[in-house]
Amino acid sequence: MIRKSIKCICTENPEQWIWTEYMLLQNEETARRYLIDAYSRRPFNQPDRLAYRNVPAFTSYINQATSLIKESQTNHPWVRPILLYYGMMSMLKAWLLTRIPDYPQNTAVLRHGLSTRKRKRERFRFCEDEIKIQREGLFPLVAEEWNLPPMTGESYTAKELFSFIPDLHPTYHRLFQQKSLARVFFTRSGAGLLLHVPEQVLDHFHLSAERLVDKLNQARHGLFSLSTSRGYDGYLTLHCACDEEGLSTVVVDNPLPPHPGFPSLSTTESLCVSFHHPWFYENKKGDLYLWLGNDRPVAPLPEILVHLMLLFSLSMLCRYDPPLWGEIMLDNQQAEQIIIHELLELVPRKFAQLMLTAFAEEKLILRAH
């Protein structure tokens, strides 16, 4: 997914702004105009006719998704994962309809596309549970539209999936005594940008600076090069190529405070950087983190798919093993309960924002007054 533009929104209530934006996709007249534009960009033949045909299904998916996700915020944790997961599914079905006008092409694409162990082990820990990717269904279809390679048979533990979410990283670090993400910063360099990465990541990857650049460029060829500019103590400085395939910026009046230790360093939110690379993740404010990998070599996943996999697993627990779900959510003996609660609080805001970015095909930075 390449984002070619940036929209910075100042609002008193970011979450309310998000749901107000979705109203434009719930209304048939405005949704039809959106679909015409989406089909024209692909391009498809007769975008007007396709939009007229698909707008009832599209608005129905959006209405169901927004209702379920917002309803989850008012319900007890006993049912929250079920409401969130099916709301997320409906949102992704609407998005697929903008890229595949004939969706659903067959009944196979209506499956979950994910599976998890039905009979849980004794002394079950959710973070050790594995979610496996199937050959057919919603998940592999969305992954294909995200231009990801086939992942049939690949599995991820819930702990691995939590490692991708920057908003949960402080809790992840405290619970597992591991760092999965490293905060990065920027400075301007003429028309381009310099990316400053903590030098400790070289020890983590067991790589030299040159090999780290090669590793990152394998995913986005030519985006990075080692900078010859004077850097900052404790940071590795990389030059970022500015082009519409990789990175773009806009200047924002009254930017947020920079890095407290180095006043000349900036956060991505203060510069409004639209940055696209699979090894980098953003929190809901737009700050950027480099993913440090896991205990085994798994590929990074888009955060939208991470949310979907985690909520799939949690919703299966809710539906098919209520006693076990009750132990996890109501028994304070398990520390992983904390990160699950945080996830359930985060998803309605973060997933909705990520999907709005996918629908608009532009980066959204929401800044509270």
Image: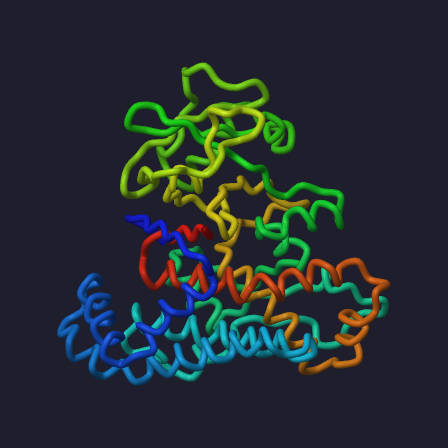
Q: Residue at x 53, y 39 (%)?
A: 290
Residue visible at 49% across and 32% down in the picture: 258
* Residue 65 seen: yes
Image quadrant occupied by the N terminus: bottom left
Examine the image and state in which quarter residue 181 appears. Answer: top right
The residue at the point 60 percent across, 31 percent down is 201
* Picture quadrant where residue 30 is located: bottom left
The residue nearer to you, when weighing 292 against 80, is 80
162 on left or right of 242:
right
Could you say where residue 230 lies in the image, as x and y percent from the top left? 45, 14
The location of residue 156, given as percent across then percent down, is: 62, 58
- Relative to 276, residue 17 above or below: below
Foreground residue among 241 and 191 = 191
Residue 319, placed above or below residue 367: below
Nearest the viewer among 171 and 320 is: 171
In the image, taking residue 244 as reference, residue 140 lies left or right, namely right
Percent position of residue 98, x then y: 30, 70
**Can residue 214 be seen in this snapshot?**
no
